[in-house]
Amino acid sequence: MHSELPTAPAQEVASHTEPVTLPTERHTGCPFDPPAELTRMREEAPLRRMRFPDGHIGWLATGYTAIRSILSDQRFSSRYELTHYPLADVGELSPAPLGDLTGIDAPEHARYRRLLMGKFTVRRMRRLTERVEQITTEHLDAMERRGGPVDLVEAFAQPIPALMICELLGVPTGGREVFQRHATTLLDQKTTDEEKGAAGTALFETIHELVLAKRTDPTDDLLSDLTAADLTDEELSALGAFLLGAGLDTTANQLALGTFALLSNPEQFAALRDDPGLADQAVEELLRYLSIADPMMRAALEDVEVEGQVIKAGETVICSVQAANRDARRFPEPDRLDLHRKATGHLSFGHGAHQCLGQQLARVEMRVVFPALVTRFPTLRLAVPSEQIPLREQMNIYGVHSLPVTWDQE
């Protein structure tokens, strides 16, 4: 796969030996582009030495080929306690909590992944597609009745993924309002750490109670399926909480930031509005273009040669997915949003053993939501100047805190 891509000559990589720090400031004039310094670094050397805030000297990978190679190589570990944090000196990282699949390796990771992979069946995804369509229509109807301007995050982008997680996990209809309220509290920038902690505890307890109920009275949902597996109540509850966190914030921000990107590129908005059948390609291109989950961390378990450089055992590698997804050696004219582009092969869901398990559900939601939104509101536009949109620049998942929009109303 992609073996035809050119790699940087070893002497070119070796010439950039002074350790750099991870660029995070997006001083490019475009809220969707990676930091300009990150782009410059990728063009100079797709793999280079990096100095971490705690003093560790590891690596920064920015090239598509280098990152794809690292993410697919099991000689690199995902265990948090083996890595160094790239954004601040937080001391030694703790091991992943129970249920967190992103911070563990095989065989434990493989055991959980095998249990989960078979649960995302074509039949279940088809049924979930029908529910996404119903829920999307209900929220579009509510927006139309209310009239603009509205905050698209609050009215549309957050509640739809929250309700779909309820569908996936099998949360009863009567309990979904409480479930969604706690989830919203976790995502609300105005809530305090104490309030977030209380909401997180309440959500875990809700899932734990749900697990116990599914063991005695299973229904057709993911948690019920998993009660037949060799998992304790604590493991199953923790997996449910992990799936909630993994599928809620990411999809909500992809929907909101994706809409912002479409509104900022009117010709692309019009392309999807005029041809809803473009949805599949549009989703993949928006995933590539925005790359909201960045960066990914790995630690070398042994000496590994990548791009002519030897990454030594114990060294942390930061993989900048947003840089890789804008690598012109893989995606021509990478800084241009083009919904007609075949953007397959992007790394927004990761790659290799830890590739996102929930990507099918995320795609189902986006394939329904984006064309439904632009066809229902063909005159949709920002209600404030684009520079006033509050960006989630200091958060693990990039996006917008709010997105005020309006449209022509009859």
Image (cartoon, rainbow, N blue to C red):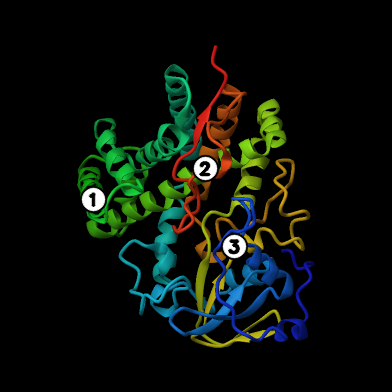
In the drawing, what numbered circle is on residue 388?
2
Of circles 3 and 2, which is in front? Answer: 2
Q: Residue at x 24, y 59 (%)?
A: 234
Alpha carbon separation for disc pair 3 and 2: 26 Å
> x, y percentage for residue 108?
39, 69
Residue hosting label 3:
321
Going from the N terminus, do you reach mark 2 or mark 1 first? 1
Residue 316, above or below 139: below
Where residue 339 appears, as percent x and y from the top left, is 70, 41
Tell me the amino acid under the disc marked 3: Val
Q: Nearer the viewer, mark 2 or mark 1?
A: 2
| Amino acid on which disc 1 is placed | Glu
Task: Tell me the residue at 66%/46% (across/down).
Answer: 285
Q: Is residue 179 left or right of residue 344?
A: left
Q: Secondary structure at mark 1?
A: helix
Can you give x and y, in whole percent of width and height, for residue 298 in the image?
Answer: 51, 74
